[in-house]
Amino acid sequence: MNQGFLQDVLAGLRLSQKALSPKYFYDEQGSEYFDQICQLEEYYPYRTELALLPDVAQELNQFFTQHSLDNVQLVEFGAGSLHKVKPLLQELPMVREFVALDISGEHLKRASADLAQSFPQIEIKVAQGDFTKPIRLELSEATSIGFFPGSTIGNFEPKEAVDFLRNARTTLGKDSYMLLGVDTKKDRQMLERAYNDSKDITAHFNKNILARMNRELDADFNLDQFRHVAVYNQKLGRIEMHLRSLVQQEVTIAGEAILFDQDETIHTENSYKYHPEEFEQLASSAGWQGEKTWLAPDGIFAIMLLRNAGG
Ligand code: AVI
């Protein structure tokens, strides 16, 4: 039994507001659901960012050329299927090396082998590790550019986002840059629709955390006794996902009984949304300076280039 997972689960479910870390969504089944979410019409962040990336790549090419950056190492944090890096690699001949950083191995190894076939001129490496911590990379003479797409930074608490950005600055070294996808604040309707899709894929994704505890921690959650809830908390600028217990019930996890009142929830995820200026401020407290922002039509998504401000 995965003891780290079990300990985190029990600690989270003993809290007065029960909570689980969203990192536990992503077992094989959960990653499959997430891929399906990305194909949904309602889930605008994925397709909006992907549509914006070719323009970003072209302008980055000009920017790097103007700044005489002709030897670039691109480092993707939390790399998964490596779809989003392709438009960048296609437009940026100065990228000589690409490093995919993530905790999980197999999926990434397969994706990077495919990428190596499409871009034989680029050295492709996979580095396994907890990308939220500083990682020692073999940095060559190249200028390092971090890449963190998908608005995954929104799944961190703002304070954790600052820590992540500070650690990324250490990982990437001086004179580095960082390119991030950031989902923006917008009207509640569009936000809530993206997390309450009509095919209930997001509900399956959310409930998979219960199914995963059943599979891996000898738990006995009845998935039909919980409902997926996703609401925009405007005050805190975040989508909150919860699982609401439909009845009063007792669930056992590795022998420990956990009680649920009717309507009690497990808080499973936050997805923070930022105004670009607000995000620049957050990044500046981690030592990054806003260099350029690309906005999708109607400002529904931002891609931001930050420069390591040194110090
Ligand atoms: C991975 N992350 C940026 C997604 C998000 O939008 O916060 C995860 C997700 N949760 C529900 N739908 C998608």
Image: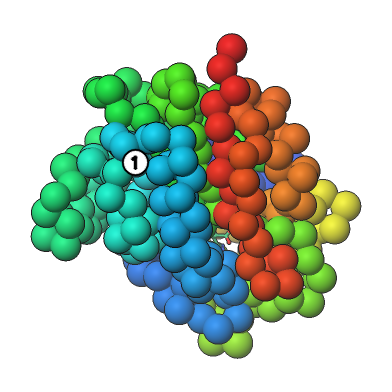
Residue pictured at 64% horizontal, 31% vertical: 289
The answer to whether 84 appears left or right of 95 in the picture is right
In this picture, is 28 found above or below 167?
Answer: below
- Ligand 1 falls in which quarter? bottom right
In this picture, is 287 found above or below 9?
Answer: above
Q: Which percent across, then down, holds residue 193?
A: 69, 78
Q: Is residue 114 visible?
A: no
> Which amino acid type is shown beneath numbered disc 1?
Leu
Colour scheme in the image? rainbow
In this picture, is 172 found above or below 305?
Answer: above
Residue pictured at 16% horizontal, 42% vertical: 123
**Which image quadrant is residue 213 in?**
bottom left
Q: Which percent across, then down, holds residue 10?
A: 53, 40
Q: What element carries label 1?
A: strand
Q: Residues within 10 Å of mark 1 (few under 14, many from 20)?
A: many
Q: Quadrant of the image for the C terminus?
A: top right
Q: Which percent across, then down, holds residue 13?
A: 61, 45
The answer to whether 101 appears left or right of 232 in the picture is left
Q: Mark 1 points at which residue?
A: 74
